[in-house]
Image (cartoon, helix red, strand yellow):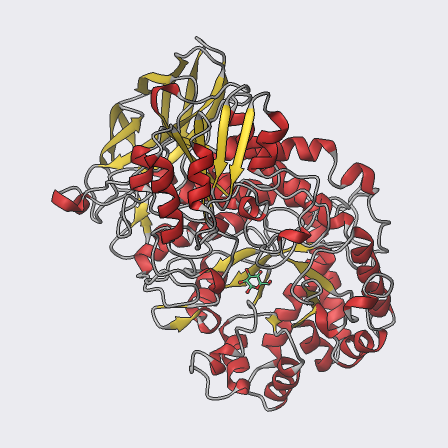
Amino acid sequence: MEPIKDSTGNPTKKLAINATDHQVRELLAQMTLEEKVGQMVQIDYSLIGTPDYLLKDSPVDRQKLELAISKYHVGSILNAPMSPDNKAQPVAFWQRITAAIQQASTNSRLKIPVLYGIDAIHGATYTQGATLFPQAISMAATFNTELSFKEGEITARELRASGLPWNFSPVMDIGRQALWPRLWETYGEDVHLATTLGTAFIKGHQGSDFSKPDKAATCLKHYVGYSFPINGKDRTPAWIGERMLREYFLPAFEAGIKAGAPSVMVNSAEVDGIPGHANHHYLTTILRGEMGFKGFTVSDWEDIERLYTRDKLAASPREAVKIAVLAGVDMSMVPFDFSFYDLLLDLVRSGEVPEARIDEAVSRILSVKFQLGLFEPQQPPLPIDTHFATPEAQAINLQAAHEAIVLAKNDHGILPLPKSADIFVTGPTANLLSALNGGWTITWQGDNESLYPHNKLTVLGALQQQTSGIIGYRQGSSFDAEVDISKAVAEASKHAVILLCLGEKPYTETPGNISSLELPAAQNKLAEAMLATGKPVILLILGGRPRIITSIAEQASGVLLGFLPGMEGGRAIADILYGAYNPDGKLPISYPRSSNGHTLYDYKPIESFDSNTYHPLYPFGHGLSYSSFATSGLTVASPRIKTGESVHVSVNVHNTGKLKGKETVLLYLHDVAASVTRPNRQLKAFKKVALEAGQSERLEFTLTPQDLSFIGVDLKRIVEPGDFELFVGTEKAKFTLTE
Ligand code: GLC
């Protein structure tokens, strides 16, 4: 049915949504209960796919697909070929699979299209040759909102070129537990930074209309409180009081909803003893009642069944389905069978789940399918040469990688090195693309190096390509075992400077669990041996979370914190080492000095005494340049401001060095006294500027009443009059908020 058009013949956004409501109601009225329940079922690709040897020409098993769509009326399919694990496929594969599914849908009674969902958290993970960006933790280190927007644009474009309209991204969890194996999928420990970059990604990814051929739908995950397991291990209990939930973990999701994300994926773990998939208070009272979310929720992997098999909350798989659907889960990522379909049908027929709840969930799902344009005749795929892995996309990816690298130490200006330098490179992350990319890269764990593109450069490869001097190399150690440390020492003694490349192998989710942030002994042993040579050592650390490098860093002459800079990371690191790029990354997390050093930058006043103080190896926001910058003249427009008014702040930033460079100016707020203890500071605004040597710029910031607010004693967001302080660099300014 055509959407209602306005006088100019175009459906305005509001009209389009009303039209969608009308279309949904009309379609729903024609659907059988079976067809409705089917829309709530999401299955893995493997239930309709062919064996590996057939993938190239016929990726879909017609009979299996027919069964899924005609008998079970499946609403969604996810993932990539599993054998032996999820594996990236050519664009042609994806176009073939989505065309086959679309064809099967049009053969069904009501021709309801299937919604294909995929993980593309740093680019189109499972499409060969896609532009794969720095991971979220590294995008956060850029403090570059525009880059995050562009990453969203490019990711959506390359997904749609593959025929894929729905991305299980961005992660809006806040990374406040350094041990957690998915820290790197977050934008770090700060709410404002995560909210700003996450919403920019959504806006780039969706544009003003995600039915456009180069836009795609996003999915906020993992709602909510998944990122704060008390023991740091994935999918273990979080104990988050509601005030902390509302102060730190809900705001990014609320912002993502306002930015237009049409789906939310549910937290796989539990908070305060309630599994995410059983939490009516979070999923319905807060998400719907308070935040007004109109899209649909999708479970995470097998997590409805796990209410029975793992959490022992449900007494049977049937009760698990009942609990989850009544709590507010609209779609089940089952994903390996049709049990959810059978059980939910039975629950509705028995009256234990009202059909009205089914209608509510299905309406939300259909509405997103209409908004995605899936009911319209499908457009031909975008031309690959102008929309997939283009030179412009690669250039933007290289810029992101440049801006993601944090120069944490540069004693006596040892960096940058001349291209003629004589460098000895060693360590487990020196010659691996997988160490630059991490999980969700070509495969689920990202650890199959043989599948990585041969035209991308490791750190070693990039140095060898760029040098006009000498590059020596020995692995020295793998991630957790000695290889040839003595040979590495012998070789190192022949060179002038050592690049020691340490860190983590790729991982995601539970396989990435660790019991300590300490580096493996073999890496520490290699480091000690390299430092003992007496040669200047530059430490490069790559990986998804901070590891304890204190002793090495204190003896090294230079330290680069690379995290996961993506497919262009090798080039970016070489450019920074040789000074072709002046580093400007800043830490989006506090870098711990010791394994138990978990105090974060927005610590409370009670953490300002004795041994409780904030004492990281490198603080949140830390990052050096080959130039130098200073700020001055921090000014508040008015020292007394009425509650409800905005606060206008300005400050000068100067490039006091000899090189052009970029500097991020961070504006922090401190509420001096309030009815709930307030952090010593909270980031409330930031701006990144490029300045020539000697250039200055005056920056303007506006803080809204929302920026001054906090979650009060009664769990409501409030603003209290009183004194406030603002910090930029070493400067402080004050203002008083009056009634
Ligand atoms: C995984 C992850 C989630 C991902 C989903 C589909 O278990 O928790 O982030 O989107 O399954 O792959």
Quarter occupied by residue 329: bottom right
Q: Is residue 486 above or below residue 315?
A: above
| Residue 516 locus on image (x, y percent) | 34, 57
Question: For the image shown, how many numbered marks are present on the structure?
Answer: 0
Give the x, y percent position of residue 132: 63, 44
Residue drawn 67% across the image and 60% down it: 117
Q: Is residue 217 shown to the viewer in this render?
A: no
For residue 574, side relative to residue 443 (left or right)? left
Residue 643 at x, y percent in the picture? 30, 35
* Residue located farthest toward the top when viewing the structure as drawn: 694
Q: Is 78 rendered above or below residue 177?
A: below
Q: Quadrant of residue 81?
A: bottom right
Residue under the point 77% across and 46% down? 213
Does 177 appear above or below 693?
A: below
Q: Residue furthest left?
A: 610
Horizontal relation, residue 436 to residue 84: left or right: left
For the C terminus, the image quarter is: top left
For image coordinates 37% across by 41% down, the residue present is 527
Q: Is residue 485 visible?
A: yes
For the N terminus, the image quarter is bottom right
What x and y, as percent, mark residue 74? 72, 73
Q: Quadrant of ligand 1?
A: bottom right
Taking 648 as reference, is 295 above or below it?
A: below
| Residue at image location 22% in from the left, 45% down from the top | 604
